[in-house]
Amino acid sequence: MSDELLQSPLHDRHVALGAKFAEFGGWSMPLEYAGAGVVKEHVAVREAVGLFDVSHLGKAIVTGEGAADFVNATLSNDLGRIGPGKAQYTLCLDDETGGIVDDLIAYYRDDRHVLLVPNAANTGEVVRRLAAAAPEGVKVTDHHQDYAVLAVQGTRSDEVLAKLGLPVGHDYMSFLEAEFAGVGVVVCRTGYTGERGYELIAANSAAGELWDRLLEAGEEFGIQACGLGARDTLRTEMGYPLHGQDISLDTTPNQGRLGWAVGWKKDAFWGKAAVVAEKEAGPKRILRGIVSTGRGIPRPHMQVFLSADVAVGEVTSGTFSPTLKKGIGLALVSTVVNPEAEVSVDVRGRREVFQLTQPPFLDTSVRES
């Protein structure tokens, strides 16, 4: 693995736990841990609690008079739908094409302060675009390598955080500011697994102790350190898109089934003209869920067929679901195809039968109060 890859402030902890590493967004991050593996880590989140290091995620702060208004005039979703202390999934779109530069979470502290958490590989581009457009008095600062992000996910996540004296029980997509070991921690009721959980944002200096204490506190609840392999299978079961696979500059919110993350009634946001026009005309392709009716496991770039010789789409994400015990995935499919049609996927030269469906693939506890 290249020495040029960035490392999490928790890298030594992962090495001690026997992690297998992989490159992700320019970072060397744990894929899975020795003695566990993707399936065991996945099941721990669905049935108990898992701890992820997702410090590779970007961190950017927009501050100054009118900061929230500026974010609202550029990113797709409408901050007017939420208030201070709330988080919102939103999109950074290309102004000309409406293509998705990145999907991210905006944490709205107040009118002068918005924290943005983009994907690792896209942080620089999101910050560049925002900084170039920022009016006088508004500052966009990249803090990508200054903060760690730890995700505590699963039905027992509240008990783990409570043992550390961190706040729990607040609404889904909200956040509270707390303190741990004398350092500020943002406790966000967010996640990428579909289970009840939290994401903790803290300065790098506190990351190691926070990680250690969370594992200690969670031992009685069956906590498991989890890598990005389980994070991927968990998010796929929920139908959550991954930028660079399911969505990209070549896809729009309409195609990615992300119209709910667009403030259609807002006066302005980047890409508005393009996505409104496409919405009115109707997109030519759309992201669908696919579920195997046999033993086939889909993988990215496999072709989707409606009949023997009619290709109608391509798999963007695919995996074996540890929960459903079958192959599932996401695919960009032509909108002329019935959304509940039976299709076939070319799996290594064999045609395997799949059912189109609308994700998520299972019900979870993500929104439980």
Image (tube, grey):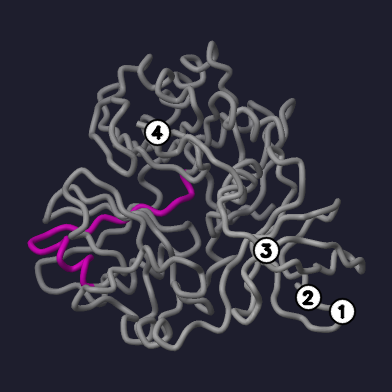
Which amino acid type is marked by label 4?
Glu
Q: Quadrant of residue 335?
A: bottom right
Residue 65 forms part of the magenta stretch:
yes
In the rendered structure, which disc, 3 or 4, sits on the residue that comes first in sequence? Answer: 3
Q: Position of residue 104 (x, y in %)?
A: 39, 58
Sequence-earlier tag: 4 or 1: 1
**What's the CA distance linking mark 1 and mark 2?**
7 Å
Q: How far, Cα to Cα, is label 2 from label 4? A: 38 Å
Residue 114 picture location, percent across and down: 22, 54
Which residue occupies the extreme right position in the image?
349
Task: Indicate whether residue 364 is drawn in magenta.
Answer: no
In the rendered structure, which amino acid carries the disc numbered 2? Answer: Phe
Mark 2–mark 3 Cα distance, whole angstroms, equals 11 Å
Element type at marker 1? loop
| Image side of residue 209 versus residue 79, left or right | right
- Tally the numbered discs: 4
Taking the image as shown, residue 167 lies to the left or right of residue 260, namely left
Most foreground residue, 251 or 19:
251
Residue ID at (39%, 42%)? 190
- Residue 368 image label: 4
What are the residue bounds of the magenta stretch?
Answer: 55-73
Q: Nearer the viewer, residue 246 or 333?
A: 333
- Residue 24: image quadrant is bottom right
The residue that mark 2 highlights is 305
Residue of label 3 = 356
Q: Is residue 206 left or right of residue 108?
A: right
Local crowd size for mark 1, using a 10 Å CA cut-off: few (<14), some (14–19), many (≥20) = few
Contact, mark 1 vs mark 2 (Cβ under 8 Å): yes
Q: Write the residue at 28% across / 73% down.
A: 264
Residue type, label 1: Ala
